[in-house]
Amino acid sequence: MGAALALAERSRGRTAPNPNVGCVIVADGRIVGGGWTQPGGRPHAEAMALAEAGARARGATAYVTLEPCAHQSQRGPACSDLLIESGVARIVAALEDPDVRTAGQGFARLEAADITVARGIRPNEARRSMAGFLTRQALGRPHVTLKLATSLDGCLAMADGSSRWITGPQARAHAHLERSRHEAILVGRGTYEADAPRLDVRLPGLEDRAPNRILLSATLFRHSSESWNIPVGESDRTPPGDPSLRWGDEIGNWTVIAEPHAIATLPNVDHILVEGGAAVASAFLAADLVDRLLLYRAPILIGGGRPALRDIGLTDLAEAHQRWTPVDARQLGSDRLEVYERERNEG
């Protein structure tokens, strides 16, 4: 299952609206096939693994991070049917699929074909791996990661707004890796106007993983959600609603939303990375839309700088407790990364 989970990570942020699933097929103690959901959601992980295994799948065990789908699609057959046809003897799955089109029916179909099914193997890791798909299924919106890069005293910039660079190269490289694992990245108008951010992925071999760019502004545009295309080089063209704002030569396609909850309307986005600034971070926290927090802290003190957060609507200190669970911490050069997940009542 660990190998299947590792394979699933290869397509995180590239499979929406389908989940990023991993599958490994084992026969006689050896891996004979492996696969992961391909970009755009097809082929599924099971289909990829079975294609590699071929006839060796007969009598084998298939380890899969999510219940094999039971519904037919114009884009491909149901994975539960493919597994039955392959002759596998046993399925080991991490999670049941919450999609109503499958939701236990895949397991039932496999068991009806006399295939042994084991469930609930390493489910917490699978939930974390497929957080985008599961959040969309449960809450009807993308899974939101908020990234904050601060000094030890909680500042994200100097008093004059300068912030390049608070963290070192290792931390910035890790942040680019995180970008590659999200379908979309969001900043506010203030960050856009101050920094003209490229929001791309500048890691060798991952340049094509740049996420879609989202701009949050409550006043800039006439509609709550609007997208437009601006070819690179047309820097003298202005977006609708604000003749004072001009686009830089680097800026291509942007989608604009007027308020945080509008992320639910973004098509084919199950993971969204919120990068700044303080107003945007505070707005998402106040709306309780942040599911995961990346806190990069540099060993510096600024004093009198710009704080990372503004008012997030907290009225009682007791409300601040038992909201965030630490799930990871590591050193990135001279900087410290801490990762937290939002505690939510699944009931």
Image (cartoon, rainbow, N blue to C red):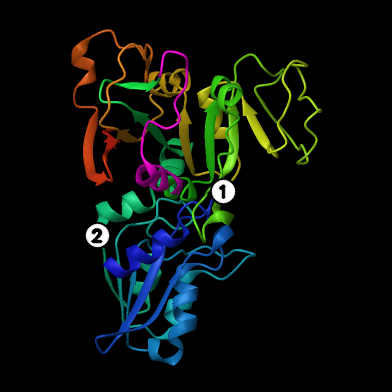
Viewer-proximal residue, 10 or 47?
10
> Can residue 347 be seen in this snapshot?
no
Side of 11 where 317 appears, left or right? left
Number of the label disc, if any, that sits on residue 309: none
Viewer-proximal residue, 207 or 158?
158
Q: Position of residue 41 (x, y in %)?
A: 55, 60
Q: Amino acid at mark 2?
A: Gly
Q: Amino acid at mark 1?
A: Ala
Task: Answer above or below: position of 17 versus 312.
Answer: below
User: Which image quarter holds the N terminus?
Assistant: bottom left
Is 169 a magenta residue? yes
Which residue is drawn at the image coordinates 26% and 63% (left, top)? 119
> Can residue 192 be seen in this snapshot?
yes
Viewer-proximal residue, 75 or 229?
229
Is 33 a magenta residue? no
Number of the label disc, if any, that sits on residue 120: 2
Q: Which residue is denoted by mark 1 in the rendering?
A: 210
Which residue is drawn at the image coordinates 56% and 55% (left, top)? 207
Q: Residue furthest top?
A: 315
Say what secondary structure mark 2 lies in.
loop
Q: Position of residue 133 (x, y in %)?
A: 45, 48
Say what secondary structure mark 1 lies in.
loop
Quadrant of the rendered image containing residue 3: bottom left
Mark 2 surroundings: few (<14), some (14-19) or many (≥20) residues within 10 A? some
Q: Position of residue 199 (x, y in %)?
A: 55, 39
Quadrant of the rendered image containing residue 43: bottom right
Span colored in magenta: 158-176
Between the C-alphas of marks 1 and 2, the distance is 34 Å
Check whether the beta carbons of the residues at disc 1 and disc 2 lie within 8 A of each other.
no
Q: Position of residue 126 (x, y in %)?
A: 31, 55
